[in-house]
Image (tube, coloured by chain):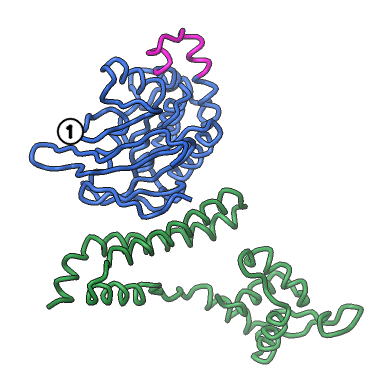
Chain colours: A blue, B green
């Protein structure tokens, strides 16, 4: 396959005696949105964590832009996660003590960008996600839908090549979920970022270009790449 | 979808001739299937015969297409009843698909493949509807939402059936 940005091959991972991944494989091309679907406990979140370098598989290889993650130092992997990857989770991703703009600016600040520049860039991204009007509020003062759009802005602020989204609309109602997905997908398409989208909701998966199904820790490629 | 009731509902806003009715219908409801002229006039003839509409003059130019139609009191009652009566919940494709799954299991074929092929077709349809929603107006969005929720229900059934294939296989074999 050409233009593969990220791949996981024959990944295996257990938690205690329970196998979470049992030979799972998938690839992500540049600019592609891939939905990872499957029943609860099937291993789809573990697959995302392995691909993102958050969890190390016991065997198998994760390769990003030609480099195997297991061959990198912890420091290199951290830098990769901070600079090349963006993350959107279902809950609890915003720091409650910080304002929303400070939350969005956080990945830039951690990478050494000066506060003023980081917050200026953060405000631009918040504008694109239609939450610039609440930039100075704190996470506890805004709705779930607004908070999730802020989280999307934070995931995009460093210009990542891959966004890992794990049930990004799981805590939202249909309308707010739709807004988050519409904005996440349109901004990712504009910037050329790929998305690995873990979801159990078919309506959310319908925003993807293709899907990979995980069952009992194994991936099933039910759709051929066009 | 009852075309007759939809036309009656549109006539409640005032008398219209057939062409005008078709235009307003298509504007509001004809996103997928615009009405054929023949269907408009055959429906109006039936409504006329049943006393639900009446002719209310002819516009200059003559010809049957220039006749204006108005809703009658009986028509208003009819459309009111239609509006307050819930539609029958319908079962969609499960019957055919269930048959395929059982036959696959009985013949030793992969029922999972059958379900996954359907899953691909469903998700493809959902992607098309999602794209149409993105580019469409509010009416498009509402129509697509309805179809999306139905397809999603089917997909959930496909997933649940996939999870139950092992039990179903044992039942079919016994």
Q: Is residue B87 left or right of residue B131?
A: left
Instruction: Relative to A210, say whether A168 is above or below.
Output: above
At 24% across and 51% down in the image, what residue appears?
A: A215
The picture places residue B14, in percent across and down from the top left corner, at 73, 71
The picture places residue B11, in percent across and down from the top left corner, at 69, 74
At 75% across and 80% down in the image, what residue appears?
A: B69
* A117 in the magenta segment: yes
Q: Quadrant of residue B73?
A: bottom right
Residue furthest bottom as drawn: B49
- Residue that label 1 marks: A58
The front one of A123 and A189 is A189
Identify the subunit bearing mark 1: A
* B57 in the magenta segment: no
At 62% across and 74% down in the image, what residue appears?
A: B6
**Magenta part, dominant SS:** helix
Quadrant for the N terminus of chain A in the image: top left
Q: Secondary structure at mark 1?
A: loop
Instruction: Relative to B52, say whether A72 is above or below.
Output: above
Instruction: Relative to B20, say whether B116 is above or below.
Output: above
Magenta span covers which residues? A107-121
């Amino acid at each position: 396959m050409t233009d593969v940005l990220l791949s996981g091959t024959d990944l295996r991972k257990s938690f205690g005696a329970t196998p979470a991944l049992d030979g799972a494989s998938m690839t992500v091309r540049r600019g592609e949105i891939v939905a990872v679907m499957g029943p609860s406990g099937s291993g789809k979140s573990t697959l995302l964590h392995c691909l993102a370098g958050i969890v190390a598989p016991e065997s198998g290889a994760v390769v990003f832009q030609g480099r195997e993650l297991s061959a990198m130092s912890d420091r290199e992997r951290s830098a990769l996660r901070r600079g090349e990857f963006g993350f959107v989770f279902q809950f609890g991703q915003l720091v409650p003590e910080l304002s929303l703009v400070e939350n969005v600016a956080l990945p830039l600040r951690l990478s050494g960008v000066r506060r003023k520049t980081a917050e200026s860039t953060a405000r631009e991204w918040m504008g694109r996600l239609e939450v610039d009007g609440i930039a100075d509020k704190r996470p506890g003062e805004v709705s779930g839908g607004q908070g999730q759009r802020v989280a999307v802005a934070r995931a995009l602020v460093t210009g990542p090549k891959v966004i890992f989204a794990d049930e990004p609309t799981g805590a939202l109602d249909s309308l707010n979920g739709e807004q988050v997905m519409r904005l996440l997908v349109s901004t990712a398409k504009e910037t050329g970022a790929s998305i690995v989208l873990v979801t159990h909701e078919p309506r959310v998966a319908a925003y993807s270009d293709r899907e990979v199904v995980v069952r009992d820790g194994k991936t099933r490629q039910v759709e051929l790449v066009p | 979808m009852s075309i007759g009731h939809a036309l009656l509902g549109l006539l409640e806003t005032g008398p219209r001739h057939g062409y005008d009715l078709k235009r307003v219908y298509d504007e509001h409801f004809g996103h997928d299937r615009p009405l054929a002229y023949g269907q408009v006039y055959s429906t109006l003839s039936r409504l006329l015969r049943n006393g639900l509409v009446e002719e209310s003059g002819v516009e200059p130019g003559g010809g049957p297409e220039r006749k204006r139609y108005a809703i009658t009191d009986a028509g208003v009652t009819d459309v009111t009843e239609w509006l307050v009566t819930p539609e029958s919940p319908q079962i969609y494709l499960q019957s055919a698909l269930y048959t395929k799954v059982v036959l696959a299991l009985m013949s030793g074929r992969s029922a999972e493949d059958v379900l996954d092929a359907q899953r691909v077709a469903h998700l493809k349809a959902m992607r098309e509807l999602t794209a149409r929603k993105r580019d469409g107006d509010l009416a498009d969005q509402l129509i697509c939402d309805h179809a999306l929720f139905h397809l999603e229900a089917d997909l959930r059934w496909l997933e649940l059936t996939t999870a139950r294939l092992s039990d179903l296989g044992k039942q079919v074999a016994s």
